[in-house]
Image: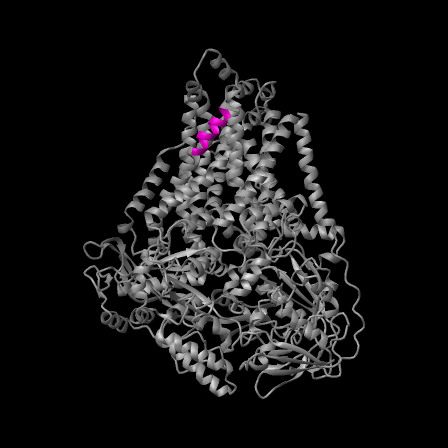
Amino acid sequence: MLRVVGRRLLHAAVLVLAVSAACFVLAELVPGDFLAPARLDPRASAESLEALRARYGLDRPLHQRYLSWLGSVLRGEMGHSLAYGVPVAPLVLGRAGNTLLLSVPATALAWLLALILGAWGARRPGGWGDRLSLGLGATLQAVPELVLALLALLVAARSGIFPLGGMASLSAGELGFWGRLVDVLRHLALPTLVLALALVPVLLRHVRAALSEALEQSFVHAARGHGVGELRLLLTYALPAAAPPLLALFGLSAGTLLSGSLVVEVVMSWPGLGPLLLDAVFARDLHVIVGATLLSGLLLVAGNLLADLLLYAVDPRLRRPGATP
Amino acid sequence: MRLRAVSVLVVLAALAAIVAGRLLRRLPPPPPAATAPAEPPAEALVSPRPPGRPGGQLVVALRAEPRTLNPLTAADNPSQTVIWRLMADLVHVDRRSQLPVPALARRVTTSDDGRRFRLELRRGVRFSDGHPLDAGDVVFSLRAYLDEEIAAPQRDLLIVGGRPPAVRRLDDYTVEVELAAPYAVGERLFDGFAVLPEHRLAAAYAEGRLASAWDLATAPEEVVGLGPFRLVRYLPGQRLELERNPHYWKVDAAGQRLPYLERLIFLFVPSEDAQVLRFQAGESQLIDGLSGANFAALEAGAAARGLRLLDLGPGLSYSFVVFNLNDVDPAALPAVARKQRWFRQLAFRRAVSLAIDRRALAEVVYHGRATPIATHVSPGNKLWHNAALKPPRRSLERARALLAEAGFAAGEDGRLRDAAGEPVAFSILTSAGNRERAQMAAMIQADLAPLGIAVRVVSLEFGTFLERLFDSFDYEAAILALGGGDVDPNSDVAVLSSSGAHHLWHLGQPAPATPWEAEIDRLMSAQMTARDPAVRRELYHRVQELVAENVPMIFLLSPNVLVGAHREVGNFAPAILHHPTLWNADELYRRAPAPAGGR
Amino acid sequence: MSGRRPALAWPVAVLAFLHLIALGADVVAPYDPAEQTRELIWAPPTKLHLVDAAGRWHLRPFVYRWRPADGAPGRYVEDTSRIFPLRLWSGEAGTRRLLGVEPPARLHLLGTDGLGRDQLSRLVHGARTSLFAGLGAALLAVAAGLLLGTLAGYFGGWLDDLLMRGSELAMALPALYLLLAARAFLPLELGPAAAWGLIVVLLGLLGWPPAARLVRGVVLAARRRGYVGAARGFGASHVYLLRRHLLPPALAVGLTQLVLLVPQMILAEVTLSFLGLGVSEPTPSWGSMLVPLTSYPVLAAHGWAFLPALPLVLTVLSYHQLASAGRQRLRRTA
């Protein structure tokens, strides 16, 4: 087990190098640089722009820029944001925390809903519960997440129950711990719901398919013949049998915790990684892009590793000595 | 099994840690209590507006976070919006009258040859930390702005006659600035140059760190200025809070020290729609940069909600279609080079211009809240607009006649062909982020169809768009907008002069490519040194005539400046110059008692 | 619980209907999808009447013209002074349309968009882009995912490591940035066919890693089942094992993923168009018709702007049903 984790850590290091190098090369290929928008500034002359370019080090060759970035990684800075003029690590880490605060509960909620609705549908295929979840899922899939988020804002505006985006009230600083907790939860409610609703259809279909597959297997039929209760049948017989694709899916959804909530964050003014990354891409703020990308890349690796470990944990056969992970 | 339990525990623990960390993190401690404000300076500037009521706060949403608080390097809109609430300049262009008025300099005298300006400072003025202002700060600031290493975007505005001006300190309260050549802009020149605190920044300057000073990680009490407000705290991704500067140098007619507002809060709200909803719900009290559609949506029920929505008429920005007349390499870009045969013909450009229905563009895309324009100078520019030039009205007959004269003819299939028989078709580049211009492009496409011209719309991300426009020249036509700086003709030099950085239709000309471009060059340099405003206006009107006659760009519309405020905001006096609603933040006040802490 | 076979008739009928409409768009659409009626911006759906304003019944359904409401910009009321009967197969020879009304009235059964274009016509024409490109991209992604996922799961070892780390790399790269770079290498203008191919290829390339991960998980587990080991013990070949025991469960997961990807791909096409990589104005697509909904004034004022989402819902439902049937068949063969 430790060997697996150790090897994956090594792979992660390789991934970091590969992704960061790829980002730097891509940055060469993508037209325009950080100073391109300044060209529309009526005040700045071409000479001033050249001077700025030199100051930001944008005129240096690719490999030099990459090496100096690697150096700053070793210093724990992860490079320097051109837009904000500060090291990337604190900038990105702070936002990543906010994103997780939103995406972890949303993903958990989505899985909960998917498991409940999926089990319901798989038990009675073609029943009204199955049809309802299928119809709702299809509708949610046909409405872009952006529209869903805007609808939620509209509901908030009309009802007045929920705040119109943001993470905290202006007065939150003066509240006590519980006051702040309630305040954050109130701000969390709508974005979490929207994000969960956007995630549910995909999870639900896979859960439904895997479970109905498992329920068809002979040992489940045998267990039912032996009088095993429905709930126990689902939890202890069908769910483990349905685990392989679901665990892989779980790994994937854990891996997209940082990158999956971009749209919701932008529309609901959530101070997460999403708006920062989007801004950075359009502003060509390379180090921020690389920093945010690497962070979500590492989470992806971690998610997949977790999925594989869980897969071994669930399926004892895979743990036999000599089994290649 | 054990492993599963462990991993579940790890995930839960991580989650709990994150949540707890978020919640327990307290806001930075409040800054030390404002030092008891001394008497206003003897030479305080008296605001002409009716006295208001002190106290309360205003909340304003920003589309993006400011990137820096350093006036020397700030180039983006949000940064400038914040910075100019913290800083002040020597001479200020009044945003309503568009004329320069005294600010930190109580008087400016210009020498007879127009090269030397003597700036006399107001006495008794203090920075927001209580440190007195003197001529040394002004000299320090101008030196910083002129420093090539720092490369402030405003630097080029001060380079007159090819050389930076000489800045001299005459006494504690007088500074002389000597330009290398006479300059018609006059004292207006000094608008937009913040006076910086030498006592705070001298060390950073000496160490060559001035350009990177005052970023968002700087401690709030370090950011010291002469503006109406000072920094309290910055919460990344959420908001930035300013408080009243107790040392501000303006008073109202009743002798009360400005500003009235206790706090000014900038919320970061990336989506325009979310901004509108928040404004509507009363979570923010001012809004600017509204689209026509959002303006219309807010108008419904505005009175009941206590919103004041104002259409200030055309602003300074102008949208246009530009044809690629650059010198391109026919081997590298054969299609573009071939089509330039059409683009270079005045008749062709005029015909396209005549075929576009500008009124329909304004109605459909901007809900009627945009104004058709004839040249780059919109009617919003009160001082310089040449009202004799009317925007072209759509006339397909005249367009067809022009095309026929130039040898174009519609074929059997209805498609227009040039003399050589090639069907006329070109693409218009738009930048994807701007929904309005994309819509305009789609409408122009439909407008040109009856002439038999096939237009394709190519939408690109902004950076990619600019690269094609400025560097690779791999485009045929493009739709974009410029302008929005100052009203003075000199702010358009970069577009008009044949060697200018924004001479978009034909960049990098070694010498003027056409006689009319040469004439515009001559007129522009003549107006730059003309001391008599009437002569200058005449010269600039002639420039506008030349632009209208030769259609280097097909000018479309100037979007109206649309703003809104809640009724309880007093002294609300929006203007089309930047910043439309906050330019007089020092005079704004809350009519009703503000709810404690806001919503 | 088991044995109930998912109905096949309706999904096949719905999909056939949608595809037929897409192919016959020129005739089915009442108008040219690019035609702009600038007096009718965001006009609501034209109402079909049988009873006129005076209370008289008519055999043939008819419509009234919209005219701008007085004093309420952007709103329309019916002009009841004249009735315009609905006409089938009208127009001149060569440009006949299935449905229409006599000008100056206009038939906008789903209303108009922000440029006064007929939504129904755009929907029908947009089906060409969206139905085919969405399915094409999803197929490409899942096919690649199936192939690579099966290889990784079956052979394991270094091949598994290589492929899965490759999938992580592909997922970790910033897609937006990748697309921007791709755009730089393409010519300024893309023809409709090139744009279509580009959508399929780019979205397919971006969509394979999740499919591969899912398939690999299933194959990895199936490989360890007792009967697979037994079959291998009897000297079964790789091909036999793959086909007989490992491909069916992999295909089942692949089918689910395929159906889930179709709507995602249809909506993702908008992002590509945004970056100049997809279809361009005025060519409609289902995704681009939903874009106006992302602005608050439209969402708040024109509820019927949601109607273009309906065919997408129908498509997704039909594909889901087909996939269920497909999985059941796989189960029986396994």
Q: Which of A226 and A133 is in front in this view?
A: A133
- Quarter residue C262 falls in: top left
Q: Is residue A300 above or below residue C306?
A: above
Question: How would you classify the magenta stretch by its main secondary structure?
Answer: helix
Q: In this view, does B556 lie above or below B435?
A: below
The C terminus of chain B sits in image quarter: bottom right
- Quarter residue B456 falls in: bottom left
Q: Which residue lies furthest to the top in this view?
A: C234
Q: Which of C311 and A287 is in front in this view?
A: A287
> Is residue A170 highlighted in magenta?
no
> Can residue A107 be seen here?
yes
Judge from the rendering whether residue A164 lies leftward or rightward of residue B233; answer left or right.
left
**x, y percentage for residue B17?**
71, 42
* Color theme of the render: one colour
Q: Residue at x 33, y 50 (%)?
A: C191
Q: Nearer the viewer, residue A133 or A59?
A: A59
> Can residue A121 be seen here?
no
> How many numbered marks, from 0 up?
0
**x, y percentage for residue A150?**
53, 54
**x, y percentage for residue A136?**
49, 43
Q: Residue at x 34, y 47 (%)?
A: C194
Q: In this view, does B175 lie above or below B413?
A: below
Q: Residue furthest right?
A: B36
**x, y percentage for residue C165?**
54, 33
The N terminus of chain B sits in image quarter: top right
- The magenta region covers C144-154
